[in-house]
Image: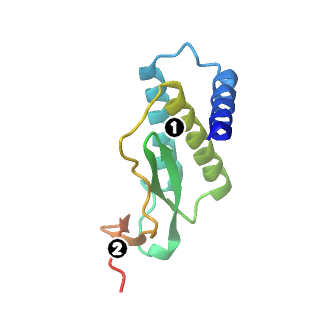
Amino acid sequence: MKKLSILLFAVVTTFTSCSNDDDTTQEEDTAKLSKMHAELVVLSGQETQTCTNPDEWTYTTLSNSCGGQFFLYSKKINKEQFLKKVQQYNESSRAYTIKWSIFCAEFSVSPAIPPTIECVDGKPKFVYNHNLH
C-alpha cells in the first residue's frame, strides 16, 4: 500500500508540476474539458456522418472523474488524429480529477461486456445486452 501511495504522489506531482493552468478556476477547467469534448464529438463524425452500417463505427473509452465511458466514432475519420485528441482529453480529465480532488462514491466505469452498435434514425447508438446465455 505504501508503494501505491508513493506512486500516486509521483503521478499527482507530475500532473501539477507540468500544468501551466494552476491559477485557473474549476469553472475554467470545466469549460476547457467541455470544449475538448465538443471537439471530440465533431472529430468523431457523430454529427456529420449518417449511420447506415454499424460496422462502419467503433468506439474508444473517455475518462471522466468517476471512471470512464464508451465513445463512438466513425471508422471513416482520421483515426490517428482523433485518438491523439482522445488521449489529450483523458490526460486532462485525470489531471482535473486530481487538481480538484474529485472523489466519487460510485465509479461509472464501462461494463466489462462491450456494447454493440446499431444505426437508429441515421445515428450510431450503443446497445447494451447484458443477458448472457
Name the image quarter holding the C terminus: bottom left
Determine whether 83 is above or below 39 in the image. below
In the rendering, at what x and y percent does residue 27 appear?
A: 41, 21
Using the rendered image of the protein, determine whether residue 75 is visible from the camera's viewpoint: yes
Residue 14 or residue 50, whichever sits in front: 14
Q: Residue beneath label 1, please?
A: 36
Determine whether 37 is above or below 79 in the image. above
Name the image quarter holding the N terminus: top right
Q: Residues within 10 Å of mark 1 (few under 14, many from 20)?
A: some
Using the rendered image of the protein, determine whether residue 123 is visible from the camera's viewpoint: no
Say which label, 2 or 1, has the lower sequence index: 1
Q: Residue at x 53, y 25 (%)?
A: 99
Residue 19 or residue 53, whichever sits in front: 19
Secondary structure state at the residue bearing disc 1: helix
Residue 19 or residue 41, whichever sits in front: 19
Left or right, 19 with reference to 37:
right
* Mark 1 residue type: Met
Q: Residue at x 45, y 74 (%)?
A: 54
Q: Are marks 2 and 1 in contact (CB under 8 Å)?
A: no
Q: Residue at x 30, y 67 (%)?
A: 121
Determine whether 113 is above or below 90 in the image. below
* Mark 2 residue type: His
In the rendering, at what x and y percent does residue 14 appear?
A: 69, 28
